[in-house]
Amino acid sequence: MTTNEALKKLNALETELRAYNHALGCLNYDGETVAPRNSAPARGETMAFLSGIIHNWVTAAETGEIIEALLSDRDALSLKDRRRAELLKQERDDLTLVPAEEYMAYQQLMAEAMQVWHDAKLASDFAAYAPYLDRIIAYNRRFAQRKNPDKNAYDVLLDGYEKGLSHETLDPFFDLLKAHLTPVILEVAKRPRPDTAFLQQSYPIHLQRQFTEQVMQIMGLSRDDCAVGETEHPFTEGFNKHDVRITTHYHEDSVLSNLYSVVHEGGHALYELGVGDDLQGTLLSGGSSMSIHESQSRFYENLIGRSRPFCELLLPKLRALFPRQLAGVDAEKLYRAANLAEPSLIRTEADELTYSIHVLIRYELEKAMIGGDIATADIPGEWNRMYKTYLGVDVPDDRRGCLQDSHWSFGAIGYFPSYALGSAYGVQMLEQMEKTVDVWGAVRAGDLSPITAWLGERIHRYGQLLTPAELVESACGGPFDAHHYVDYLKKKYGELYSL
Amino acid sequence: MTTNEALKKLNALETELRAYNHALGCLNYDGETVAPRNSAPARGETMAFLSGIIHNWVTAAETGEIIEALLSDRDALSLKDRRRAELLKQERDDLTLVPAEEYMAYQQLMAEAMQVWHDAKLASDFAAYAPYLDRIIAYNRRFAQRKNPDKNAYDVLLDGYEKGLSHETLDPFFDLLKAHLTPVILEVAKRPRPDTAFLQQSYPIHLQRQFTEQVMQIMGLSRDDCAVGETEHPFTEGFNKHDVRITTHYHEDSVLSNLYSVVHEGGHALYELGVGDDLQGTLLSGGSSMSIHESQSRFYENLIGRSRPFCELLLPKLRALFPRQLAGVDAEKLYRAANLAEPSLIRTEADELTYSIHVLIRYELEKAMIGGDIATADIPGEWNRMYKTYLGVDVPDDRRGCLQDSHWSFGAIGYFPSYALGSAYGVQMLEQMEKTVDVWGAVRAGDLSPITAWLGERIHRYGQLLTPAELVESACGGPFDAHHYVDYLKKKYGELYSL
């Protein structure tokens, strides 16, 4: 096969894969947002069937020949074509490890597990969910062992979310966070708690929906390209630059929960929408890695969204919708409430200071789960023990404990560290950005486009063309160093709590 | 190929088709409800691609062999297997008339046309929509000519929605309606108009959403099996007995519009949900024909939903949500307002008396469109002329004129007569039902399950196993006779308007 022939075949394969992945993404989004509860089994069958077709295409002998023809002529290829071939090879290598039937059964299992998890969470019934989680863990362990029997299985999974990542990087990373942040958390606990009583009121959901529209407008998210769904556990699904979906979960008694879901998922959406035109619809669309993706979402959520200027910007808009609830609340009060730091139960609603401890707990737990050190049935107990040890909180039920996150249900074991890494990347990016962009002027003006343009230029437009390491280097102005993150948190919370 | 081999292959093909159709249905539903506006072209590509695969499967030589093997041994087959083979043959015969590329291009055209229509309707801009409609008309005309070059092209299309239907049935049907109903419409126009001022107020949409839940509960539509979407032009999409979607369109100033959309689409949903377990997931799931489907939706919407007992049932529920708006309104006043009969602009909101005249106009127009008697550009003028002639109303803009319906955009030309036929079937069904079921007792009790059970027994459970004619015979207790429908309308409106 000549290189030109291989490129033509690659294009054709890309078209096939795009269609199947679009359909799968749509079924998934529908399932997580609007589908009726009992629809899961039939949707699972369809998703398994379509996944099986992708499996067939990717593992087909001809696909191997295409990849080989391209990579044996590597130097003649453009960067884009080389990366396309490399990514396809990576996916092919992975899928080849799993027979089609096993792969399809796993897809169906996940589709059903999402529904079972959803119900189990609402009922706080871990036992109902355990058999599904058990099979998902077993699949991941088996997969990791096949992929590299000589390597620590959890490291193999981590590498799947961020090339090269392993416990050798993460152990010291989390140790650093623990060492620097735990004393701050303890000190903060001794200080007076900011007044958050104004948040514990009824904020009618139909008004919160209006507020979502305003937040999206500030972020530059056009409703013509970006829809908003409602779901149990917010996520983002991106199809192309004219079709991205964010999701949120409205709680009548928690107006900030929706706000920060929208800002977080909006950060993911801006990444997906910003992928360069030349990469749209190719294997290189979408984000480079989960931690780079989370660096964008957590950037908007925290560095921007929980800043003083952003609270100043939002307060009048919130007050227009909720005049009674926010009577007597000024921007500083909102800012302090939005940055209340205290050990708590729910990761997605945790403050920036304690957030990475929530992630650390999941990291430790996943290591043990995949390493076979704890049985599935012991997860709730272990979860609760670690929340007590690391954060000093008592977990009252599994709904607010080990059933709170959706990730394991869609097979994502090894994903959580991305949140902490991404949060840390973001701080270095902000420091770089501030050198040339009037970040806080943009926030005050209620138009984040200069911020998004900077990120777009250095990260978004590259899609999966560059590696995570290359993107970090490009946007952080140097290699990653978690001390920036730690210093940022110490400074922010030192000022907030007069430490 | 033995009959047994053919049946095995038929089962496998059915599994393939079910998965592709599920994915297509999901993409379509998503596109019509929650997808962002600019998503249409990429969705169109994916839908065209998946439709192309269905086309390939259905037109494949082996599929022909399966059908032939089965139908050549017709008498040995169960009714179910024979019908599966017959339906597949029908679809294969149709698809074989259209080359795959042309078929895929048409699917993409329709996906895009839906979006263009949506925008054009809002902007009342027929010119923007005309090129799409033009190509849809041309495709349908071409298809009809290929299918049967010796037959009137519009008759060929009608036959696609209801086997055996042609202008020879429909011309006298509509003539009968015109002859009997026009004098009543004229008489009604001379009588005092019921007071509907209480409807022209603000009925906040978030409260209307709550009302939808109550209406679904009365209808016995479980939210675990049936979702509610919001869309421009309400429709129903059914996947299986645990996954049906109805849609509605909320208008703040028109609380009855949502009510009757939900009841209408709910009728479709009950049909889809009631298909027998043995037919689920087979080629025989779904409704027997469009007019049978509309007989169910219009049955609930009008015969039940616009009845006096139903208005009595709903009033307290409505008043609990809208006490200010409904102060001083009694059930009789609601009943009379819900049955206001007067020539109007919008088919879906028309009263029962004038409704079939709206359908008649579309029937006449489609005959002329497909017959080549009018050019696409002349449709708005012709539409407006007929509304003036038949209903005496002036159409102020195309939004409320020829752009009001979505049907042509999804290729449905020849569908509209189903609404009038279905409405007429329903009256005969009700007369039969009343012989053994306490219909109005059930309505007063707020539990329609005895009604649904009767329809389920005679219609729903059969899916596509029986022909429309067989179902009409079974549920109407004899052959169809439109006089029942005409008599029902004369009696109802005679009483309402003291004629």
Image: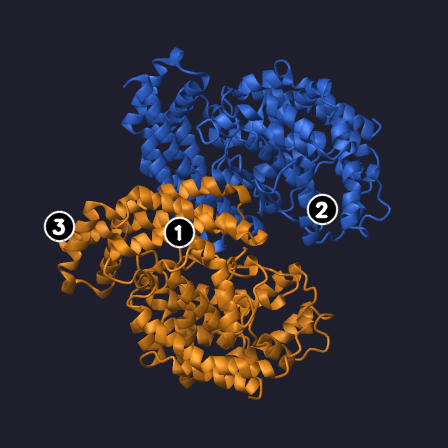
Chain colours: A orange, B blue
Residue denoted by label 2: B255
Indicate the chain on which mark 1 is placed.
A
Labels 1 & 3 near each other (Cβ < 8 A)? no
Q: Amino acid at mark 1?
A: Ile
Q: For the residue labelled by badge 3, is the local secondary structure a helix, a strand or a loop?
A: loop
**Of the numbered discs in the image, which one, if any, rests on residue A227?**
none
Q: Nearer the viewer, mark 2 or mark 3?
A: 3
Q: Which residue is mark 1?
A: A136
Of B293 and A379, nearer the camera is A379
Q: Chain of mark 3?
A: A
Q: Is residue A376 above or below residue B130?
A: below
B476 is higher (above) or lower (below) than A146: above
Q: Position of residue B165 (x, y in %)?
A: 52, 21
- Residue B410's spot in the image, x, y percent? 48, 39
Q: Amino acid at mark 2?
A: Val
Mark-to-mark CA distance, 2 and 3:
65 Å
